[in-house]
Amino acid sequence: MITKNIKLNAFIAQFSKFGSVSVLTTIFGIVSNYILLEILHLPLYPVYISVFLVGVMISYLLNARFTFKEKTSVKDGAKFYASYLTGLVVGLILLYIFDQTLEYSDFILTILVIPFRFIITFVLIKKVVYAK
């Protein structure tokens, strides 16, 4: 028990599980982005969107079962993707800003976006997909 507040403990446990799934999907994303951008030299934005969409599918399957203890459904899957698409839009805006203002490789730029997307996406999934 972290605190005496049961709701806070449940939130912390859920946030931690979401973080664990996010670590796995982030590793998938980083490795995929590295291979596609740095080795194969594919274009930044199509790679970013493609890797993101595949990562969302993996994230939905793992988070539904592991984090939120829910069965997967088309309805929840659609809400999950909608929540992540909001994160994608924010990520693309930040990626564009970083791309225009920072002198880093495309690969590093994709990593800089991760913390912002993580927070936005968790809040949306908690409130939109698995609100109780």
Image (cartoon, rainbow, N blue to C red):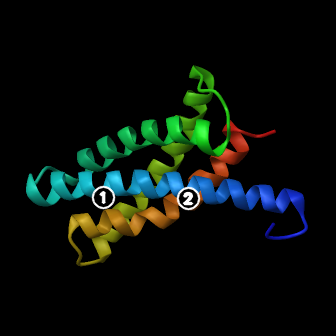
- Residue 52: percent from left, percent from top: 37, 46
Residue 59 to residue 74: above or below = below
Relative depth, front residue between 45 and 72: 72
Residue under circle 1? 30
Residue at image point 21% right, 59% down = 34
Classify 59 as above or below 99.
above
**Residue pointed to by mark 2:** 19
Residue drawn at 41 percent across, 50 percent down: 25
Quick one: which residue is furthest to the top in this view? 74
Question: For this view, does 10 lie left or right of residue 61?
Answer: right
Q: Secondary structure at mark 2?
A: helix
Res. 99 mark: none
Q: CA distance from mark 1 to mark 2?
A: 16 Å
- The image quadrant where one finds the N terminus is bottom right
Give the residue type at disc 1: Ile
**Residue 15 location in percent, x, y?**
65, 58
- Badge 2 density bin: few <14, some 14–19, many ≥20, Cα 10 Å: some
- Is disc 1 placed on a helix, strand or loop? helix
First in sequence: mark 1 vs mark 2: 2
Q: Residue at x 75, y 57 (%)?
A: 11
